[in-house]
Amino acid sequence: MIPLTLEQIAAVTGGRLHRTDGRETVTGSVEFDSRRLTPGGLFVALPGEKVDGHAFAGKAMESGAAGVLAAREVDARAVIVPPLPPGQAHERALALTGDKDGSGAAVLAALAKLARHVVIELSRGGLAVVGVTGSSGKTSTKDLIAQLLEPMGETVAPPGSFNNELGHPWTALRADERTRHLVLEMSARGPGHIAHLAEVAPPRIGAVLNVGSAHVGEFGSREAIAKTKGELVEALPSVDEGGVAVLNLDDPLVAAMASRTTARVVGVGEHPDAQVRAEDITLDEQARASFRLITPAGEAPVTLSLYGEHHVGNALTAAAIALELGATVEQVAQRLSAAQRRSARRMEVTTRADGVVVMNDSYNANPESMRAALKTLASASRGKRSWAVLGVMGELGADSVSAHDEIGRLAVRLNISRLVVVGDEAAAMHQGASHEGSWGEESVLVPDAAAAIDLLREQLEPGDVVLVKASKVAELWLVADALLKEGVA
């Protein structure tokens, strides 16, 4: 963060000073975990269901904090933020903090104001803010963008999928005067969420990857999801102000967002009208893609080390953004080819000592990402026995049964050898597979992760390829972790 006095922070957030004249300057990091504080940092006291950060204000001061951002008086130098007026406590902020009186939402609102102030100040000095949204692929694309931009200047991006009302401002406040690029992943579970995040850290470049079925149970339809995802391009500055919208032309709902922005539109994809596109796509024996990168500035070959053809679209979005920020086509191609997976449990491929390949894609799942993962498994297991260990895809609402049924049928059509469906909530996958292929032992429904682990330990053979994927609520990473405890090559 840029250096700010407690007095300045109080002015930005609308708070009042407590046990200080406000002259202390925050020069360290902004943290909601007192264990991560650096000297001169600002401790954000967030109340929650189990732990109230206000109780750690004293410990934060012992760790060298310059002050505390709090919702009530604490035994420390602090900026005390006001409660939010009725109706202004963002429902997702309340859910994040789990507090009962809205004080956590008040602290998050103050944190958002602080982040906005810092980002606007840094943007005046040349900081390029990039926002990425989509139903799937946000984290992988954010990681690719960061790897393409890092050689061009200091780059800040969130760890993993830290993309909500807490992670968004926390990441933005990692930027300082040395930072040239701020890459932000933007999630939503309802209308207005992305607009809010874009207000917290106003982006100059915004990318929309796709509109899928993730959270359709909360939104009601893909069209409603598209309306919310499009809030990002609506928030971008105009062409004259340097705004750029990077849109996936292979997705009609995303392509239609061009009419919702005054920014310059750059189309990406395999679509012939895409300015940044991929041609001659091939997959190797491990489902890693190679393609010809085509841009207005020239062409270059790319060979990805990431697993799955779906990463081609992610790579094109990253390429378009890097080109906008000054990279050459050759630099983009070289950096894409060298890029590695950074976030855990996202097509994390490991080979055990006995040759069993474990594809851990268990961080989350929706119908689109599940289809992409199954296609990757089918491509990477040619000539080998393949296992799909799949669990529930959450928040699909009325479409849940049909969506799970279709995934089971797809596993049959892709000639996956064995399907292990975990949990009754995903039972329609097992039923779909059985109806599609008249399967017998090829598909099995087990009650939980422990049962899946027992079955796999009993039946896996050297050289088998195992995909593990489900929504976070299923915690199927327990299956992948157990399989890898057998030892890796």
Image (spheres, rainbow, N blue to C red):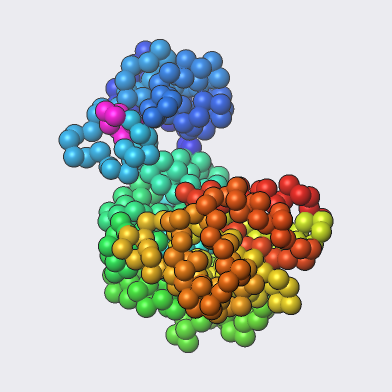
Return the x and y of residue 214 as percentages of the image width and height: 40, 61
Q: Nearer the viewer, residue 287 or 27?
A: 287
Q: Describe residue 404's horizontal placement relative to residue 310 as left or right.
A: left
Residue at 44% x, 65% y is 428
Residue, x 74% and y 77% (percent of image)?
383
Residue 142 magenta = no
Q: Position of residue 473 (x, y in %)?
A: 47, 49
Quarter-of-image position of residue 172:
top left
Q: Quadrant of the C terminus?
A: bottom right
Q: Position of residue 337 (x, y in %)?
A: 68, 68
Q: Is residue 330 visible?
A: no
Is 476 positioned to the left or the right of 79 in the image?
right
Name the residue located 72 percent from the left edge and 56 percent from the top edge.
458
Residue 376 falls left or right of residue 168: right
- The reply to whether residue 403 is in sight is yes
Relative to the observer, which residue lies in front, 125 or 415?
415
Task: Give the magenta part as a residue range.
Answer: 100-106
Q: How many marks?
A: 0
